[in-house]
Image: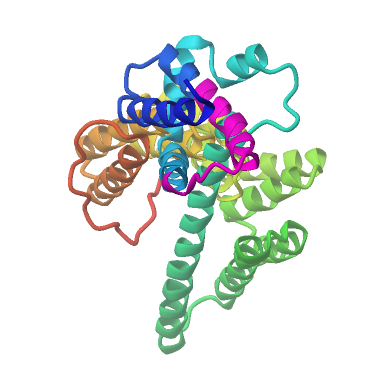
Amino acid sequence: MTPADELRELLGRVEKRLANLRGSGQGAVELLLDLDRIAELWPELEAQGVDLRPEAGRWDTIQAQLRRSGPRVLRELWAAGGLDQVRAQQHATADGLAWWWQLDSLVRQESIARVRRTLVTLGVVAAVVVGAWLLLHTLFPVDPQVQAALAAQTAGEQKIVNYGDYAGALADFETAAQHTPDDPDMWIRVGAVQEKLGDAQAAQANYARARQLSASERAFHLARAGIYLSFLMYDEAHADVQAVLAEEPRNAVAWYYLGSVYEGQGKLELAVDALEKTSEYADESNQTELVALARYRMAMLLQQVGLGDMREPEPTPTATPGA
C-alpha cells in the first residue's frame, strides 16, 4: 500500500468512527491515533507532489465534525481513563500536539463562551427591564436609594460582561451595597468580586454580613451560587449548590444552577442530567417558567452532546429563576 492509499484508507476509517462514536470506547482512542497518522502523512505527501485536493475537503469536514462531536469523544474516552490518561500514554510531552489532543480544553472554552453569551443576553434583558423600571418609577417615584443601588449594580455588571473589569465593578457594587445595606444580595456580590480578586478576608466579612441579613442559610447559599455563576466561579458555585441540595434535595433552582456549573466545566452530559431534574422538580412546585427554561437549555445541550432524540425547545422565558 502506498502512503497515498494509506491516507485515503485512514480518512475513510475516521469518517466511519465519527459516524459511530456512541459506545465505541477504545475506538475513540484509535480515532485520535488515526488522526495523528493522517497529520503525519499529509505534509510528506505534499512534499512528494501528490495532489491532495480531493482529500482536503474530506479532511476539513472530518475536523469540523470532530469539533462538533468533542463532548461525545471525551465521553467515550472515559472507558480508557479519560483524555488526560490517554494523552499521557501516547505522548511523552504535550508540546506540539495536534488540537484534537486538547479537546477537553476546547469543549470547556466553548462552554464558557456559551455562558458568556448567555450573560450578555441577560445583560441586555436586564437593561431593558431596568429602563422600564426606571420609567415606571419616574411616574410613580420610589426610594431614591433603591434606584441608585440598581443603577450602580447594573453599571458593575456591564463592566464585567463587556470588559471583564472586576476591579472597576467592585467599586460599583460597594456603592450599591451602601445605598441598600439591608439587601443581602448586594453584600454577596461585593464579597464574590473580592474573592475573585483574591481578597478572601474582606470577602468573608461581607459574606458574614449577608448571612445575617438572609432569611435562612439555604437562601444565602442559593443566592451566592447564582452570583458565583454570573462571575464564572464554578467550583465555588458547586459547593453552595451542594449545601442547598443537602438540605433540600428537590430544590429546582439549585438543580438548575448545578446544570449551569456542569455546562461551564464542559461536563455536558452531567448538565443534561441536572436540567432533567430541574424540569421535574420545577414542575412539581409549579415553577412553569423554570420548567420551560430548563427544557430549552436541555435541548440545546443534547444537540451538543449528540444524545438521542431532542424534544422541541420551548421559547426561553425572559425571567431568571428565583430562590
The quarter holding residue 45 reads: top right
Above or below: residue 42 compared with residue 120: above
Q: Count of labels shown?
A: 0
Residue at image x 81%, y 39%? 201
Whether 37 is among the magenta residues is yes
Q: Main secondary structure of the magenta part?
A: helix
Extent of the magenta region:
32-54
User: Position of 91 compared to 32: left or right?
Assistant: right
Residue 141 position within the rendered picture, expressed as x and y whole percent measured from the top left: 47, 83
Q: Nearer the viewer, residue 155 or 51?
A: 51
> Is 137 covered by the magenta stretch?
no
| Quarter of the image with the C terminus in it | top left
On the image, the x and y values in percent for residue 270 come to 41, 27
**Colouring used for the render:** rainbow
Q: Is residue 309 left or right of residue 156?
A: left
Extreme residue in the bottom direction: 139
Image location (x, y in percent) of residue 73: 44, 27
- The answer to which of 267 and 74 lies nearer the viewer is 74
Q: Is residue 108 visible?
A: yes
Depth check: give the residue in front, 56 or 98: 56
Q: Where, by quadrant of the figure, is residue 162 drawn? A: bottom right
Residue 19 in the image: x percent, y percent? 31, 30
Q: Is residue 289 left or right of residue 4?
A: left
Residue at x 46% of width, y 79% of height: 131
**In this view of the protein, which residue sits in the foreground, 307 or 151?**
307
Identify the residue shown where x is 22% and y is 48%: 288
Is residue 105 visible in this depiction of the protein?
Answer: no
Q: Is residue 148 above or below residue 232?
A: below
